[in-house]
Image: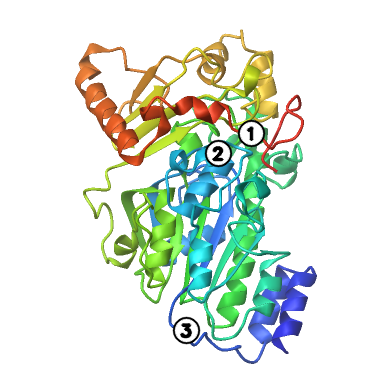
Amino acid sequence: MRRREFLRNVAAGSLGRSLVAQTLTAGRSFGAATDARPNILFAISDDQSWAHTGAAGDPVVKTPTFDRVAREGVRFTRAFCASPSCTPSRGAILTGQAPWRLKENGNLWSTLRKEFAVYPELLEKAGYAVGHTRKGWGPGSLPPGGRERNPAGQRFKSFEQFYEQMPEGKPFCFWFGSVDPHRPYKKGSGTKSGKSLDRVNVPPFLPDVPEVRSDILDYSVEIERFDREVGQIIQVLERDGKLDNTLVVVTSDNGMPFPRAKANLYDYGARLPLAIRWPKRVKGGRTLDDFISFTDFAPTFLEAAGLKPPAEMTGKSFLDLLTSDRAGRIDPKRDKVFIGRERHAWVRAGGLGYPCRAVRTDRFLYIRNLEPDRWPAGDPDRYGDIDGSPTKAYMMANRNAKRVSHLFQLAFAKRPGEELYDLQKDPAQMNNVAPMREYAQAKAKLRAELDAWMTQIGDPRATGQGDVFDTYPYYGGDRRKKRTKR
């Protein structure tokens, strides 16, 4: 079977049993790349929190591909996006810079100016074949930033199409950007697939009712579809003998699309799954607890390819962690990450955002809400920064019910200027201890660290120029309608 025929059959439709059968019966490999530099496969789901993989212990979702990458590679337990909103999160991944340095790209539905270098283009200049499929950088508009091509690379219909035209002997860098598990979901798909409501782990900040459990099951079905599709790409590379020198990264862009998760700085909004496999240089079977910011991806990929990351990248390569043979916490300096957000959707009068910054350590999450008079979920009664869902509808309809009212306030109501959560006592981050005297010293220390970081990276919010984020254009179309990330 020729390579073109093999890939055409893969893309034709039988991407499950047919692919496995062809992989097992085909008589020869197509040869490994002559370039010793690694291929880079970056697989990113759309709205998946860290807890929702088999490797993390979720009792419902089945993720054999992620679990394999984690088992044969490294799983990171403390990986955080730079911003729990799609456009700024992806911009930070691509540039290796904090979103607040990227002008408009600090907002959803914005642009990423050509002046900001992105790792796929740097790798392409160094001889890599570069491409992406489905959701790359975005959502937003490329022309205002002076770009003609998505920063994630040339767009292809599929990995198979990219792989078929790729020159032999050349390493590749490919971005597989799924749109799963982004809403909307097919309601009831989880139970129809045979999943049990009784087995769902409902986060403490959501009502534990059948409507929410069913919604989480529907979300799980879409995670599983993403996992299957990543597995199909891995099978192609394995068939060709190229998998072991491919740096495979499986992760997400921000947390689950539920109240108090996505678009929030709490863990279910910003803490994400991350597994990396590269047998040629990375010892497998390890779990690492070092803090990883998603600004760290770009410098890591560049260093793995033998390139020096540009000085403007605020992220730090973690190649040393990958190539170590240790587990647990390796680098004592990787003891925190910084997170933030600006405008998510256009859901407040005048297009105002909800600016906030945070520092997350092992023990604490400290959040500074810079405009606490604004509504964090968007103006009532739409609360548009929370995706429409059965869970949101239930909470709004039952906001005054005894078992829901407190949870409704946590997700929808205004918040104080400072929040502090003691993660040893409160891992779900539901009890703000910022006003308590016994936490005054810890709060002051974290506040100072956050201030220092904001000043160091040139965050406009640290220099009195932060209002600029509210003035940037919003390219999401009709502002009167609810905008989503698709």
**CB within 8 Å, label 3 to label 2:** no
Q: Name the residue under label 2.
A: 104
Marks 1 and 3, the one that precedes in the sequence: 3
Q: In the rendered image, is residue 250 in sight?
A: yes
At mark 3, the secondary structure is loop
Q: How crowded is mark 2: few (under 14 residues within 10 Å), some or many (20 or more)?
A: many
Q: How many angstroms separate mark 3 from mark 2 (CA)?
A: 37 Å
**CB within 8 Å, label 2 to label 1:** yes
**In the image, residue 72 lies at what x, y percent?**
43, 67
Q: Which amino acid does label 3 sit on?
A: Asp
Q: In which quarter of the image is the N terminus?
A: bottom right
Marks 3 and 2, the one that precedes in the sequence: 3
Q: Which residue is drawn at 61% across and 20% down?
A: 378
Q: In the rendered image, is residue 48 in sight?
A: no
The answer to whether residue 168 is left or right of residue 341 is right
At mark 2, the secondary structure is helix
Q: How many angstroms separate mark 2 from mark 1 (CA)?
A: 8 Å
Q: In which quarter of the image is the C terminus?
A: top right
Q: Mark 3 points at which residue?
A: 35
**CB within 8 Å, label 1 to label 3:** no
Q: Which residue is drawn at 60% across and 57% down?
A: 227
Q: How crowded is mark 3: few (under 14 residues within 10 Å), some or many (20 or more)?
A: few
Numbered mark located on residue 473 in the image:
1
User: 277 or 70, which is in the foreground?
Assistant: 277
User: 63 or 431, which is in the foreground?
Assistant: 431
**In the image, residue 386 lies at what x, y percent?**
62, 27
